[in-house]
Image: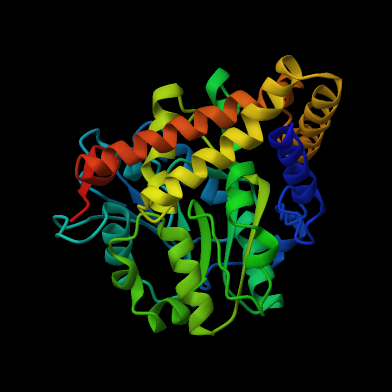
Amino acid sequence: MAWVALAAFLWLALLLVPWRPWLLGECLEADPAAVGLDPAGEVTVLMPARNEAAVIGQALSALAHQGLVLPVIVIDDDSTDGTAEVARGVGLPGLTVITAPQLPAGWTGKLWALEQGRARVTTPYILLLDADIRLAPATVPTLLRKAKDERLALLSLMAAPAMVGFWDRWFMPAFIYFFKLLYPFRWANRPSSRFAAAAGGCLLVASDALAAIGGFGTLRGAVIDDCTLAGLVKRQGRGAIWVGVTHSAVMMRANDLRGFWRMVARTAFTQLRYSWVLLALCTVALLLLFVVPVTGLFLGGALVRALALGGLFLMVASYAPTARFYRQSRWALVGLPLVGVAFLLMTYTSALWYARGVRSQWKDRAYSRE
C-alpha cells in the first residue's frame, strides 16, 4: 500500500507545484497583424538539411508567406537524395543553397552545418528552422515582434506533431508532455532563473548573442543542442529567453514506431548525463508513477484500489491539457501508463548504445562516446 500511496502523492505534488509544468500556458500562435512588422532585413533563416528531399520543398514554400523576401540559407549536409536540387527547384526568392564541408571530428552534423550558414549572416536575428517544419503565414514576424517587445535574446517554439499515423498520434504529444516535465517552460522563461530550455526545430536567436558565446563551435559536440544553446545564451546575459508551444509550426514528418524510438533514444541517456545511477533512479521513478497505480487496481484491497484509482485520476488530469491541445482521443489518456513504460524502454536503448561505445546516433551518423 505504501508504494501506491507514494505514487498518488507524487502525482498530486506534480499538479500542485507552483510552476505547473503540465499546463500549456506558454503558447504563441502566428498573428496576421504582425505581417506589418516585416522581417526582411531583420531575420536570416538557416535551414540545415540532410536527406530531406521529401519535405524541404513544403518548408521553403511556407517561408514565402512571412512578409517580403527573407534571406534563406539551406546548408546541405552531405545529402544523398537530391535535397539541394529540390530546394533550388522551389524557386524561393532570397534562397541560397550551400554545401557543408566534410564533418570534422568533435562536431555533430547539424551544428557544423549551422556554423557554415552563420558565417554568411548579416541580419540582427537568425531563425534556425528544421527542414521538416512548416510555418503558418506570419509566424516569423510574430516571433520577431515578441523578441523585440520583450527584449529576448532567444525564443523558440515546440512544433506541433503531424498527428498522422497511429504512432505519431500516440507518442508525439506524450513526448512533448515529458519534455515539459523535464524542462519546465515557466522556469526557463523566468529571467531571474539560471534554468534554460529551448526547442531547436524553430528557434530565433539574436546574432550578437550567438556571436558573444562563440557561435555554434562552443557547443559543437552537444547532443541536446537546443537546450545547451539556450543555457549559454541565458548565462551570457544579453537578454532573456522564451520557449513555448504552438500550432503555427508543424512537423511534417510522421514517425513510425522505429523512427520515434530512435528519436527518443538519441538523447535519452544524455539527459541522464550518461549516469547508470540516474538510469536506476529513472527506472524506479517511472515504474512507481506508471506501473504501480495500475497494478494497485488489481492486486490490492479496497483502500489500495482507492489510492491506485486516485493516482490514475491525477495522472490523467496532468496529461489532459496536452491531449486537448493536440486533439488526441480519450484513449490517449487511458494509455498513458503504457507510453510511460515505452519511454523507459527507449531510455534503455539509449543506454545500450552508450555501453557499446556510441554516445548518440541520428541521420545515419553514429557519434562515439569518446
**Quadrant of the snapshot with the N terminus:** top right
Q: Nearer the viewer, residue 201 or 56?
A: 201
Indicate the quadrant where residue 178 lies.
Answer: top right
Q: Is residue 327 visible?
A: yes
x and y percentages locating residue 150 in the rendered image:
70, 76
Coloring basis for residues: rainbow
267 vs 186, left or right, is left
20 vs 269, left or right, is right
Q: Residue at x 81, y 19 (%)?
A: 301
x and y percentages locating residue 90 in the rendered image:
40, 41
Q: Is residue 113 above or below residue 262?
A: below
Q: Nearer the viewer, residue 106 or 35?
A: 106
Number of numbered discs overlaid on the protein picture: 0
x and y percentages locating residue 347 in the rendered image:
42, 38
Q: Nearer the viewer, residue 337 or 106?
A: 337
Q: Residue at x 37, y 48 (%)?
A: 276
x and y percentages locating residue 139 in the rendered image:
63, 55
Indicate the quadrant where residue 293 lies.
Answer: top right
**Quadrant of the snapshot with the C terminus:** bottom left
Q: Nearer the viewer, residue 51 or 283?
A: 283
98 vs 201, left or right, is left
Q: Going by the picture, which residue comes out furthest to the top?
A: 298
Q: Is residue 341 above or below residue 146?
A: above
Q: Is residue 161 visible?
A: no
Q: Is residue 15 above or below residue 174?
A: below
Indicate the quadrant where residue 54 lies.
Answer: top left
Q: Residue at x 78, y 28 (%)?
A: 308
Q: Residue at x 45, y 22 (%)?
A: 257
